[in-house]
Amino acid sequence: MNHLTALDVALQQLRLPIFGQLYAKLAQEAQGQPLSYEAYLLALAEQELTYRHRQRQQQYLKLARFPVRKELADFDFRLVPSLNQARVLTLAEGHYIAQAEPVLLVGHPGLGKTHLATALGMAACRQGRRVRFYNAAGLVNDLLAAQEQHRVPQLIASALKQQVIILDELGFIPFSERGSHVMFQFCSALHERVAVIVTTNLRFAEWTQVFGNPSLTAALLDRLTAKAHILEFVGESYRLRQQQPRMASELEPSATHAGGGHHETPTEPGGAAETFAVPLQSTPFCVLRCAPIDPLPKTCKIKLCA
């Protein structure tokens, strides 16, 4: 076994893969240069540390189990003017994590609460922090299953090893009485020990709709809002705004028949034609409806509401 092979084996045993890949190249580059042994070793060590840091970041991103990875740079703050961009960027630096301070993202749906929570979580992963993303309803199901097996303490112990816990869509589905109690137990265990990021469409006064028990809800809010960073999302859903052109084109009926003739919207027999706007539920569109007594004709036109 020659010297180089022995060195390669030693570096493998020491788990220094970048040393093994680069030591010969750097030694060749160092020839004829005033490079000390210490500087040579430092250059190798820095490359190894950079590699390990990147590997750790990727591992933490994988273990966080983000359903979809979202970057802070892709969040359009212009669409949510209620948010203070400077405050969000400061949060992304991660100071709240060391203090185990909650971050509560509250407001209307479709404004990017999950996007922002995920982006903060990814920033934490890149800082070398352990993060775990949960859908709130899914977590309650996991806790209830663990309760049946008397494993809730183990699940909570695993959560306490994290540095950031993300609870997404809290309030989207009401919890059962048992579900409310195990979620309270989970959040109480994290209080002042792990930073918690929560996204919710509900105002705090509406949380009893989810947890049922007013006393339990008040106790949970007391823990989550203490020293919390509260970000309020107000505005029009940008997901719906992005869909409006497509929805308009899909909902606009053809004005001609197969024969090419123009078709007018029918009116009530014996009555004068009248056009008025009827809002469609859960959309920003209105129907231009004729003859208020008749059922809506299939050929009535659709436009954006004023």
Image: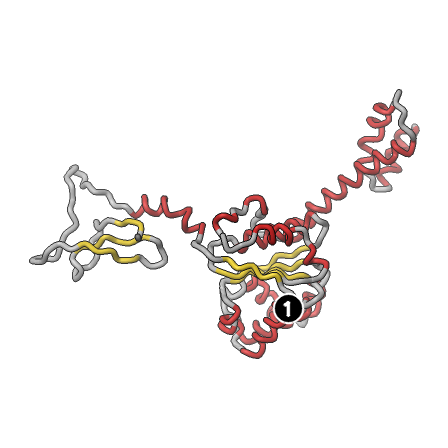
**Percent position (x, y) of residue 257?**
18, 41
**How many labels, in total?**
1
**Mark 1: which secondary structure?**
loop
- Residue 147 can be seen, yes or no: no
- In the image, is 223 to the left or to the right of 211? right
- Colour scheme in use: secondary structure
Residue under the image location 25 percent in, 56 percent down: 277
Q: Residue at x 36, y 44 (%)?
A: 245
The picture places residue 119, in percent across and down from the top left corner, at: 60, 50
At horizontal 45% and vertical 55% (from top left) the residue drawn is 235
Q: Residue furthest top?
A: 32
Residue at the farthest left position:
270
Image height check: is 66 above or below 152? above
Q: Residue at x 22, y 52 (%)?
A: 298
Q: Quadrant of residue 143?
A: bottom right
Residue 18, position as x, y percentages in the image: 80, 36
Mark 1 — residue?
Answer: 226
Question: Is 6 located above or below residue 29 in the figure?
Answer: below
Mark 1 neighbour density, 10 Å: few (under 14) some (14–19) many (20 or more): few
**Residue 263 can be seen, yes or no:** yes
* Residue nearer the viewer, 229 or 275: 229
Give the camera-side residue of 274 and 12.
Answer: 274
Which amino acid type is marked by label 1? Ala
- Front residue of 28 and 79: 79
Q: Quadrant of the N terminus?
A: top right
Q: Position of residue 283 (x, y in %)?
A: 35, 55
